[in-house]
Amino acid sequence: MQTALRTSLPETELPSRANFVPHARVVHEERTAHTGGRPLSIRGLRKSFGANEVLRGIDLHIPAGQFVAIVGKSGCGKSTLLRLIAGLDEIDAGSISFGGDVQPEDIRVMFQEPRLLPWARVLANVEVGLGRDRASSDAHARAEKALSEVGLADKRDQWPSVLSGGQKQRVALGRALVSRPRVLAFDEPLGALDALTRISMQRLLERVWRDQGFTAILVTHDVSEAVALADRVLVIEGGRIAHDVTVNAARPRQRGSAELASLEGSILSHLLSADDRT
Ligand SMILES: Nc1ncnc2c1ncn2[C@@H]1O[C@H](COP(=O)(O)OP(=O)(O)OP(=O)(O)O)[C@@H](O)[C@H]1O
């Protein structure tokens, strides 16, 4: 059921987790002040698909506003974890709790494909991210602001078909940002972009995250991207968090610095040694 809903709904129009996954064990803690990101606590999270036990007990606390990257070999369960956090799939056991009520606009997901509506102009595509607030009198102004934040104010009246791949992803980012989410989950958002566009998008992601303070969770295959962007890199192996690596490098990050290269090397060696064991 979730798969069908995922493809039929624009990803930014996510219903609240509690409504979307009726049986998910979501803990609603006391509502906190509406500032910046939300903290996230995961306890004993398990998820299987038939006999395939993908997540076997994830325990994790992410403080509000932290930027976390999730890496691991293909099929280890990175996207599954992200989908559970976003309420797009049902938990088998354990709990995921946010620091307050989870409103539909609080959690957004950005995927590798921009998933723009081809029949709607750029500004209208961004307005989709406002969900039920699309009808509000300031919807245009909010969408225009989000478009400016991603550097595409001049494309507001264009059709998606005339945009480059990088520009489409910027529109998708604007659509994700327009509701001022507290948690923004990225599933390989830059995976289809060329190397230069990818670096410029990484800088944009870092800038909007620093400006807005949301909690960021990035699934990526690219370990250099993980250490360039994240405060913390989690390595998933055997259905659990096998390594939890803090990245203390100053921001904005100097890509290619010895510090990041050394961290990248050590995370890659974890991943490769995991590969040797399988
Ligand atoms: N809806 C589903 N039904 C059945 N199996 C699934 C489903 N979604 C994921 N899986 C399986 O769960 C495992 C983890 O998949 P997931 O997509 O989370 O891995 P991943 O680490 O994100 O992989 P990749 O890096 O290749 O994108 C895989 O074995 C996959 O086949």
Image (spheres, grey):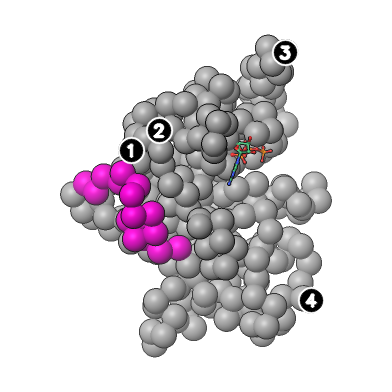
Question: Hey, which residue is sitting farthest bottom in the picture?
Answer: 137
Question: CA gap, disc 4 to disc 1?
Answer: 43 Å
Which comes before the other along the chain, label 2 or label 3?
2
Residue denoted by label 1? 95
Query: What residue appears at the point 46 percent right and 76 percent down from the top-left corner?
Result: 142
Quarter of image, ligand 1: top right
Q: Are marks 2 and 1 in contact (CB under 8 Å)?
A: yes
Q: Image check: 124 left or right of 104?
A: right
Q: Is mark 3 within 8 Å of ligand 1?
A: no
Query: What residue appears at the point 54 percent right and 38 percent down from the top-left corner?
Result: 49
Q: Is mark 1 within 8 Å of ligand 1?
A: no
Rendered-image quadrant of the C terminus: top right
Residue denoted by label 2? 45
Query: What residue appears at the point 26 percent right and 55 percent down from the top-left corner?
Result: 101
Residue denoted by label 4? 162
Q: Position of residue 205 (x, y in %)?
A: 58, 52
Crowd rating for badge 2 (residues with CA inside 10 Å; few <14, some 14–19, many 20+): many
Query: What residue appears at the point 35 percent right and 47 percent down from the top-left corner?
Result: 24
Residue denoted by label 3? 276
- Residue type highlighted by circle 1: Ser
Q: Which residues are magenta?
A: 14-29
Q: Are marks 4 and 1 in contact (CB under 8 Å)?
A: no
